[in-house]
Amino acid sequence: MSYTGKWIHIDLSTGKHIIGDTDKALLEKYIGGKGLGFALLEQMAPSPEPFGPDNPMIFVNGPFTGTRIQTSARTSLVTRSPLTGSIHDSHCGGHFGPALKRAGYDYLIITGKSEKPVYIYLTDEKIEIKDASNFWGKGIFFTNDGLLKLHSGNNPSVATIGPAGENLSKIACIGVEKYRQFGRGGVGAVMGSKNLKAIVVDGNDPIKYYDEEKFMELNRLLTKDIVNHEKIKFRRQKGTMMWIRMGQEDYNFLPTKNFQKCQFDGYEGITSETCRRVLNWKDTGCYSCGIMCAKLARWDGHELEGPEYETTAFLGSGCEISDCKDVALANIICDDLGLDTISAGITCSFAMECYDKGLLEDWEGLELEWGNAPAQREFLKLMVYKKGIGKIFSDGTRDASRIIGKGSEEFAINTFGMEISGVNIKGCLTMGVAMAVADFASHTRLWLTEGQMGPDFKIEDIPLAVLEGLDEINTRNCLVICDFVPYGFDRLVPILNAATGFNHTPESLMEIGARITNLARRYNLRNGRKHTDDIIPERFFKEESVSGFMKGKILSKDFFKGLIRKYYALRGWNEKGEPTEEVLKKYGL
């Protein structure tokens, strides 16, 4: 099997660890990644405080992680989010997942809290908790480079937090190898709450397969098709930044001016074409990936991998900043100090709107006007260190709007506390429904635009499309492969079975996705979520939609709730969005 068969649990409070055998029945039921992590979290911590020592951080690989299959770099992190209070999964590329598997583990659990700053050094031969005092207070770039000097090894990978995580910002991320992130939900703050600065993972254990010959042959064919796929060629050329032009010109959903608009007059300054020219982009990618959507930028003495689409949509058009150099500089601040660029960008645009409306009397000399890039960069630093005006906004838009009041709640763009993904709902109702009902409003939950669905797609089809889309993405996040692989389960199932010895079918994989949806729903309802939270920000019910099904109309809240109720019914949930006993039994829950 392509699993290692082992897991490790490190308790930072005691400094002790336990190594155990991976439950094969759980693997078959959840595969790995998100699903396995969710099942483990529910078993271990039914209701932990997000910053409590008993809230586990579970780094979980999938069956493909570290293998030769395309996009097999990814791994999942599961915990309870301090931003939403919900069960939460975050995913990251780079080399961390493969290094963890080659160290001999399917997953790593971290609980407890150290009395002083520490980092974990984990290899196929060593398990050490080491002093991190020299790195505490330092940025992600410095820490990454410093730890790699101390631990050269085979091919080590470093996951670390910056000052944002140390200061428990609810929108703090974890940086991996500088430019990759476990980005959303405040996972960096969970790590900071444990006084854990970094994790260094390295290993040299070989990965085994149930049927290696068949796996390699199927993977050879898949690799050939992926590398030559027209969509992949386009993505390799443009990166995720292709969505700037497409969102502006084709689909009319580019978030602009804190979602007040769906088009940005200055968008040409932040397109992929402009970035390639101005930032001197070079194509790069994750471990074992021929898609190479990532772009290494070097300009004016600066270096960055990026910027990506949603970073640019929120630090750029969302704040009416039209120079890709300014976006990239803000991106560097977030990557180094450890802020999620999506939540940070939306929080910046929210603050700019508060400034524009005069909702706070004292901005301490900060002129946070639309388009003011230097002020934006200063504001990001104030958020990280919770200084002055930055302290109000350091935990995202929901907490900030509760402090500010004065109607700011209506343009605090979040669902259940998490800032939404990079599609203006005024231009895409389908994404609005998905963001309302998903376990949280991430771009990794669903990416469905009406323009992509074709001319026969109707408004009444939205609930079923959302249901099927969420379940499919859930399962992909158990396989822990990139969303950009352009093939369905019919193509992936034979490779999965060759790697693991399982006898899955496309239908059984979709069932796993539905099982995870119901598990997450039950967990979140137990921990404070209500069906009334399945809603989108108030702005989208008060301003005219500009494209899609609702073009030229103001979305009715009653109509939107009707779509949500239809989604519940298709799930077999009751009117309060609760999975029934019959549904839970159906999925073995």
Image: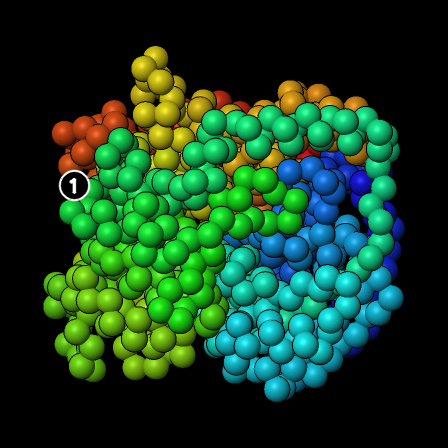
> Looking at the image, which residue is at 46% across and 29% down?
231
Other residues around mark 1 within 10 Å, as few (<14) / some (14–19) / many (≥20): some
481 or 393, which lies in front? Answer: 481
Q: Nearer the viewer, residue 487 or 463?
A: 487
Instruction: Please say which color scheme the image uses.
Output: rainbow
Picture quadrant where residue 131 is located? bottom right
Give the residue at mark 1. 543
Please determine whether, in this image, residue 409 is positioned above or below residue 451.
below
* Residue furthest out toward the bottom: 134
Q: Residue at x 31, y 21 (%)?
A: 459
Residue at image point 33% right, 52% down: 277
Quarter assignment of residue 397: bottom left
In this image, 214 relative to 490: left or right?
right
Q: Please state if 124 lies on the left or on the right of 51 as rendered.
A: right
Q: Relative to 356, say whether 527 is above or below.
A: above
The mark tally for this picture is 1
Quick check: can you spot residue 6?
A: yes
How far across and down, in percent of the image, does residue 532 sit?
38, 43
Amino acid type at circle 1 is Glu
Q: Is residue 567 visible?
A: no
Which percent across, then down, holds residue 503? Answer: 79, 24
Split into 4 quadrants, where in the image is the N terminus?
top right
Q: x and y percent of residue 198 in the render?
A: 63, 71
Task: Provide residue 434's location: percent of width, then percent of height.
Answer: 41, 35
Q: Is residue 589 above or below residue 491?
A: below
